[in-house]
Image (spheres, rainbow, N blue to C red):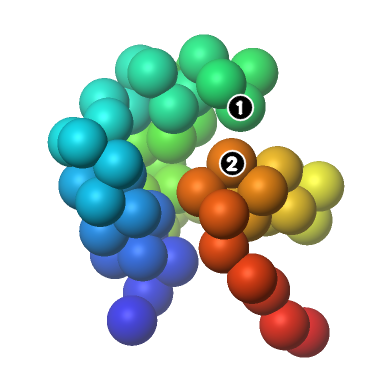
Amino acid sequence: MSFGKNLQFLRRMHNGMTQEYSAGKMNVSRQTVSKWKSGSAYPEIDKVIELCHFFHVLWII
């Protein structure tokens, strides 16, 4: 599953969280979250770690 699909899934699992809400919590623009979702851009590792904490996801390198 792609990063964008995982992000969509996690947002849906959290009561249909909007891109705007998640962007606000991550201190990025809604357009940035949209690019992550579409796969046209990927977050830097510090934002990936924040996303994992925000969605309570365990990540393994």
Residue 7 in the image, given as x and y percentages of width and height: 38, 54
Residue 13 vertical placement versus 54 (above, below): below
Is residue 42 among what the camera can see?
no
Specify whether 36 is left or right of 18. Answer: right
**Location of mark 1 (residue):** 26
Task: Indicate which disc, 2 or 1, sits on the residue closer to the N terminus.
Answer: 1
Specify whether 3 is left or right of 57. Answer: left
Query: Mark 2 packing: few (<14 Cα in 10 Å), some, or many (20+)?
Result: few
Residue 39 vertical placement versus 25 (above, below): below
- As rendered, which of 39 and 13 lies closer to the eye? 13
Say what secondary structure mark 2 lies in: helix
Q: At 27% from the left edge and 31% from the top edge, which residue is drawn?
A: 17
State which quadrant residue 54 falls in: top right
Q: At 30% from the left edge and 41% from the top edge, which residue is drawn?
A: 14
For badge 2, the amino acid type reads Phe
Query: Mark 1 packing: few (<14 Cα in 10 Å), some, or many (20+)?
Result: some
Query: Which quarter of the figure is the N terminus placed in?
Result: bottom left
**Location of mark 2 (residue):** 54
Residue 58 in the image, given as x and y percentages of width and height: 64, 71
Specify whether 40 is left or right of 24. Answer: left
For badge 1, the amino acid type reads Met
Is residue 27 among what the camera can see?
yes
Q: At 26% from the left edge and 26% from the top edge, which residue is drawn?
A: 18
Query: Which quarter of the figure is the C terminus placed in?
Result: bottom right
- As rendered, which of 15 and 27 lies closer to the eye? 15
Q: Nearer the viewer's eye, disc 2 or disc 1?
A: 2
Say what secondary structure mark 1 lies in: helix
Residue 12 in the image, given as x and y percentages of width and height: 21, 47
Labels 2 & 1 near each other (Cβ < 8 A): yes
